[in-house]
């Protein structure tokens, strides 16, 4: 039964997980950005498909972890170099959610979209007081003085704080440089806007962070005009092939992993 279902799916979807024939691509970047593989794979597939004249990216995300956001940014940049790419911002496209939009040729935001939040945050947990109350002690044997930096069992030393600040500053510079390149803006101007604050879509339009105001259907019209192809179907993805059980187990694991991750530093292009 499983084999027959897979065979039918391959026949219907032309074997590559997408529609066949001439159509637009529709890429959804939704929720926290913690993994980039499926989005990047779909972007690459659309880039290489000659039957796809242009791509619409729908973003509704507060951002997320730096590395995956940078991978999506790079994939969007490669795609935009060979065919029209239009971004439609939903209710939220902030920090990493804004970052991944920047290489697109045109960014369309609702007047009330929350966007911007250009900045970096590093999160550290602290269990020191709790461990003291329950009589728990902790000791680490390390190969270097910074190997244990960010431990939740003790306070940061001044040297460790300066070390983490230097990392945040470098990641911030990368963010600003990529926004300036993607939006064809002066880097100094981007830095003026990049204090972490959120902008409305209307404010972002005045500041040059987005190109025009409008909704999802308006963004579709922009893509149709840019390609000159008129009405074509939209091939939407990435398709998440998960069963209900997989989603339940994944949710539990993500909570466990999230708790474990907070033992060490977590660097994010994320709205907080």
Image (cartoon, rainbow, N blue to C red):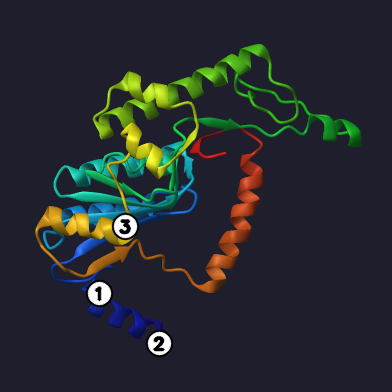
Residue 64 or residue 160, whichever sits in front = 64
Marks 1 and 2: CB-CB under 8 Å?
Answer: no
Sequence-first tag of 3 and 1: 1
The answer for how far apart the CA atoms under marks 3 and 1 are is: 17 Å
Q: For mark 3, what is the residue?
A: 27
Give the answer, above or below, for where 224 lies relative to 131.
below
Residue 95, picture quadrant: top left
Residue 156 in the image: state x and y as whole percent: 69, 20
Residue 209 in picture, x, y percent from top left: 33, 36
Q: Residue at x 24, y 30 (%)?
A: 184
Residue 161 in percent (x, y) is at 62, 17
Please give the residue where the numbered disc 2 appears in the rendered image: 1
- Pointer 1 residue: 13
The residue at 13%/67% (across/down) is 22
Q: Position of residue 135 (x, y in %)?
A: 90, 33
CA gap between label 2 and label 3 equals 30 Å
């Amino acid at each position: 039964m499983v084999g027959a279902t897979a065979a039918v799916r391959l026949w219907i979807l032309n074997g590559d997980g997408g529609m066949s024939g001439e159509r637009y691509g529709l890429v959804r970047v939704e929720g926290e950005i913690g993994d980039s593989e499926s989005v990047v794979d779909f972007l690459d597939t659309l880039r290489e498909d000659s039957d796809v004249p242009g791509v619409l990216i729908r973003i509704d995300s507060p951002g997320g972890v730096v590395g995956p956001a940078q991978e999506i940014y790079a994939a969007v940049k490669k795609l935009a170099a060979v065919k029209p790419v239009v971004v439609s911002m939903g209710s939220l496209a902030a920090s990493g959610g804004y970052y991944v939009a920047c290489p697109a040729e045109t960014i369309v935001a609702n007047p009330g979209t929350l966007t911007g939040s250009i900045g970096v945050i590093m999160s550290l947990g602290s269990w020191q007081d709790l461990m003291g109350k329950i009589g728990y002690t902790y000791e680490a044997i390390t190969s270097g003085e910074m190997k244990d930096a960010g431990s939740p069992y003790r306070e940061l030393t001044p040297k460790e704080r300066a070390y983490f600040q230097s990392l945040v500053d470098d990641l911030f510079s990368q963010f600003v440089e990529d926004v300036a390149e993607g939006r064809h803006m002066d880097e100094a101007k981007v830095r003026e806007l990049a204090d972490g604050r959120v902008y409305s879509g209307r404010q972002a339009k005045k500041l040059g962070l987005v190109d025009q105001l409008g909704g999802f259907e308006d963004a579709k019209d922009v893509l149709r005009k840019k390609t000159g192809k008129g009405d074509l179907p939209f091939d939407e993805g990435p398709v998440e092939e998960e069963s209900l059980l997989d989603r339940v187990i994944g949710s539990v694991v993500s909570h466990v992993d999230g708790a474990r991750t907070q033992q060490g530093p977590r660097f994010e292009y994320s709205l907080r």
